[in-house]
Amino acid sequence: MTPQETIKQAIMADPANQAFTAAGIEPLFAAPETAKILIIGQAPGLKTQAAGLYFKDRSGDRLRDWLGIDEATFYDSGLISVLAMDFYFPGAGKSGDLPPRPDFAPKWHPKLIALMPQIELIILIGTYAQHYYLKQKKSATVTETVRDYQTYLPHYFPLIHPSPRNQIWMAKNPWFEEDVLPHLKSLVATLLKSTES
């Protein structure tokens, strides 16, 4: 059993996750030891959890476009890792999904990140990942953080969620497509090219 599989079994055995395990639901994450880029988002949606594959939806298509990579690179290259702030669907709220459980990432992220020594860039998608990893005040907005993305380089790159629902936000903030995304694609291309022999 690989170290990643050992941690996966521990996550499934955790009393906090027993309802999911009993229902046959496994934690959604990818932590290949060869990963160069780590993507940290919020939590799987219900459809994603049912499919058993992270970012296998329209948001994932848009994210891969932003990164400038295809599905094969995203899922099969061993160069991309994905750790959400919670590896399970947290439930539906009145206006969208509930927040990820606040104690999940502190418990499991360090263990998995320790197994990926080649990570060079961590992409932080959305409020929860950005507040946690950038040690921000809760008043910090995603718009402010993404606009100031160069402040967090070279280690972190903050992004909005690639959900189609953010199309209005993108229309109101043209600098995102004009400045942020070209820089992101360039960084990703450089990192992935460095792995080629």
Image (cartoon, grey):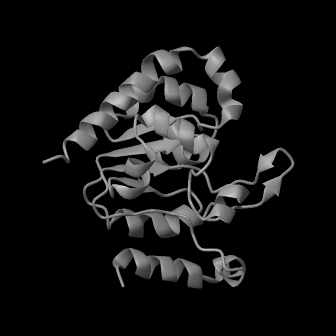
Could you say which quadrant of the image residue 60 lies in? top right
Question: In the current view of this chain or complex, which residue is farthest to the left?
Answer: 197
Q: Position of residue 190 (x, y in %)?
A: 25, 35
Q: Position of residue 149 (x, y in %)?
A: 43, 28
Work out whether residue 83 or residue 78 is closer to the camera in this orientation and state it: 78
Work out whether residue 38 or residue 111 is closer to the camera in this orientation and state it: 38
> Is 7 on the left or on the right of 94, as rendered?
left
Work out whether residue 28 or residue 196 is closer to the camera in this orientation and state it: 196
Residue 22 visible in the shown view: yes
> Is 155 on the left or on the right of 5, as rendered?
left
Q: Position of residue 146 (x, y in %)?
A: 51, 29
Residue at 69% x, 76% y is 20
Q: Quadrant of the N terminus?
A: bottom left
Work out whether residue 156 or residue 169 is closer to the camera in this orientation and state it: 169
Residue at 42% x, 42% y is 70
Residue 100 visible in the shown view: no
Is 49 rendered above or below residue 133?
below
Is 65 rendered above or below residue 41?
above
Is 42 rendered above or below residue 21?
above
> Is 167 on the left or on the right of 175, as rendered?
right
Question: In the current view of this chain or complex, which residue is farthest to the right?
Answer: 94
Residue at 32% x, 56% y is 35
> Is 187 on the left or on the right of 92, as rendered?
left
Residue at 71% x, 33% y is 165
Could you say which quadrant of the image residue 19 lies in? bottom right
Q: Position of residue 169 (x, y in %)?
A: 66, 23
- Please state the total of marks drawn on the protein image: 0
Is 1 rendered above or below residue 137?
below
